[in-house]
Amino acid sequence: MSALIVEDLVVDYQGRRGLVRAVDGVSFTVAPGRTVALVGETGSGKTTAALAAIGMLPPAGIRAAGRTVVDGTDITGWSRRRLRGVHGTRVGLIPQDPTSSLDPLLTVGTQVGEALRIHGERDRAVVRAEVSHLLQRVGLTDADRIARSYPHQLSGGQRQRVLIAGAIALRPAVLVADESTSALDVTVQRRVL
């Protein structure tokens, strides 16, 4: 069974002069434990294709055609509400921009632990321990201090690793990484990947 199957994906955006085709007939399959890269120039639709494949298009995006199967479940046409049960558990996303992806009013530990709490872990000590483990796993050695920090108190590379920790918290079958290591130095990139 494939972790992710995307067939004939077509995505449009509503522009001032009508619809603009951003993705036209993209198909790919990701086997469990494998990596697939969408490669292209800036603006070629890589991010749009990835977000559409996992049901996370921004409001202006229109999925015009295509089929997506995640971890054996066809999620084509699912509502945003229904997709919430898939996000985090079967699909994780590491967004491109750590600055706009983290809530400035919450500690990063709270944000990484949110997925664990939403999906049933109520014991605060267990959540704290798991958050610390996740932060260490992505190379943040002073994990307890980092967990108590707010995003603005961290470097860009640290914020990026916090996003990676949050994305892997529930061990999803599919992990979509949108230039997830661009803010990291080469040695950290190698360890994280």
Image: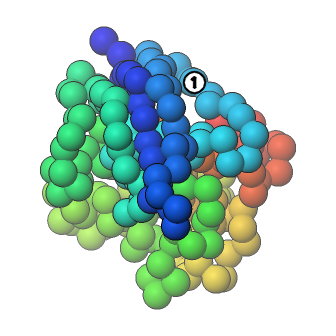
Q: Would residue 60 appear left or right of 100 to someone viewing this image?
A: left
Residue furthest bottom as drawn = 105
Which residue is pictured at 69% across the width and 31% down the height?
A: 39
Q: Is residue 138 above or below residue 122?
A: above
Residue that badge 1 annotates: 36
In the image, farthest residue toward the right: 186
Residue 171 can be seen in this image = no
Q: Secondary structure at mark 1?
A: loop
Seen from the viewer's position, the closer of residues 107 and 27 is 27
Would you identify the image quadrant in which residue 186 lies?
top right
Q: Residue at x 46, y 87 (%)?
A: 105
Choose top left, top right, bottom left or bottom right for residue 36.
top right
Q: In screen coordinates, is 106 left or right of 156?
A: left
Q: Position of residue 169 (x, y in %)?
A: 39, 50
Q: Residue at x 23, y 35 (%)?
A: 75
Query: Residue flagged by tag 1: what amino acid is it?
Result: Val
Classify 143 as above or below 24: below
**Residue 58 falls left or right of residue 21:** left
Residue 97 x, y percent position in the rendering: 62, 63
Q: Is residue 100 visible?
A: yes
| Observer-nearest of 159 and 42 | 42
- The x and y percentages for residue 172 are 36, 38
Is the N terminus in the top left, top right, bottom left or bottom right quadrant? top left
Q: Residue furthest top?
A: 1
Q: Residue at x 23, y 48 (%)?
A: 83
Considering the image in quadrants, where does the C terminus appear? top right
